[in-house]
Image (spheres, rainbow, N blue to C red):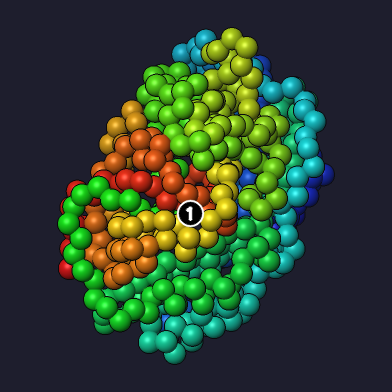
Amino acid sequence: MIPPLAAGLSPAGLGPQTLRALLEAALAVSEADETELIYTGVEEALTRFAQNSIHQNMAEADATLEVRAAVGMRVGAVTTNDLTPTGIERAVPAAAARARHLPENPDWPGLTEPQTYPDVLAFDEAAAALSQDPPARARRVADLCAQAQAAGLLASGALGAARYEYALLNSRGLFAYAPSTQVDVTFVAEQPDPAASAYAHATGWRLNQIDFEALRQETLRRAQIRQPRRHVPPGEYPVVLEPYAVLTVVEAMVEDGMGALAVQEGRSWMNACFGEPSMSPLITLVDDAFDPDGLPRAFDCEGVPKQRVPIIAAGVPTSPVYDRWTAAREPGKVSTGHAQPYADEDWDGPLPENLSLAAGDQSVENLIRSVERGLYIPRFWYVRQTSPHGAAATGTTRDGVWWIEGGELAYPAADLRFDQELVPALRGVIGVGRVRPALSGFCGVHRLPALALESFRFIDEADGEP
């Protein structure tokens, strides 16, 4: 019999013993040959603000159970957040019933055997406390808004904090458990006249990873300008990309094929590059789930231990990341611990979630000094992939573009639209920043420095820009 969860318990604070008992009871009602159960509990809170005033405080507590059931080579999945005994007793057999109506999967590798995991710390009491303390979040936000107002600026954004609890159990005897926390702050400071804006973002599993004061001071400083923006004609220019812009570039390349499924299906930019010096030797990119200043993780959603995977070594693409399903399709391959939840509607195989681009020895100021005439770009916006080959993408600049003249920021520039193959762009890296902040993206938390590139192609002014 499945025990009901005690009333009033935090869905992200049940602990390994309670969760193991719950999942073992759920496993007992399975009718499948193999069954995998994944519990995810979350408590997250968000304080939003706009035009120097808090306008929303929200909190969410939820828990989900993902059930993957195999009947022979047929695999079905069900996800529910009804964790009453009745809800679980309905969901677990439903996954097996669904499997019986699906075609066989010839590449099904079976479930993961019991594993040994490295010690990974990703839970911070101060971050967890912030998720439960609206006044503490409000004080941080109010301080930011007050400083923005004093500078004649408008600040908008959000401060969020969350705690998570993750547990996995399967019918082969595997059990894995991991608690974690995360704090995110994102805001934009705007100046009405002349029109200007600056963007800031930081994330971390420890509250003390985020230097709120430094982030605030730098962003307010960059938003205060005295010159109106000028037009820059379309063309190819050297650029200095802040880490926010580099995040967009790197995640566009993730979407265009750093996972094994895209490579196996021949739709990755990596297909034409393996073993070749396709980028600058200054580019070394690894997926490192053990980086204590990123968002550490010990295992993936199949219960496979994470591996540190070199993806690009000194400009040479070396390997995508694998889950158990894609590894089974290639002789001699094993999962690198990068499986993604199969219940996701946009599932596209394994993905890197903890990318780390090797730091250089330059400050952003030195990178700017290395450019005679070009553009300084804090971040990109509304980026879309146009072709996986060469990792081609288009999008616009946003929040504080400057024209560089003689190695100095000469004047603010109107936003531009770019259209660029990213692999050739990264072949022309002429400098790498030494600071690598942790930044949240669509597929994880990554640590990335600023980059200076020889050439980036701009095709038009961004829509609606003066």
Q: Name the side, left or right, on which 404 lies relative to 25.
A: left
Residue matched to label 1: 450
Q: Is residue 462 visible?
A: yes
Q: Amino acid at mark 1?
A: Ala
Residue nearest the observer in this picture, 11 or 435: 435
Q: At which x and y percent is residue 183? A: 60, 62
Q: At which x and y percent is residue 399? A: 35, 65
Relative to 105, residue 246 above or below: below
* Residue drawn at (37%, 79%) of the image: 224
* Residue drawn at (68%, 60%) of the image: 206
Quadrant assignment for the N terminus: top right
Residue nearest the observer in this picture, 184 or 421: 421
Tag count: 1
Res 289 quadrant in image: top right
Q: At which x and y percent is residue 285? A: 55, 38
Res 310 quadrant in image: top right
Q: At which x and y percent is residue 175? A: 76, 33
Q: Name the side, left or right, on which 116 lies relative to 45.
A: right
* Residue drawn at (27%, 78%) of the image: 227
Q: Name the side, left or right, on which 96 lies relative to 165.
A: left
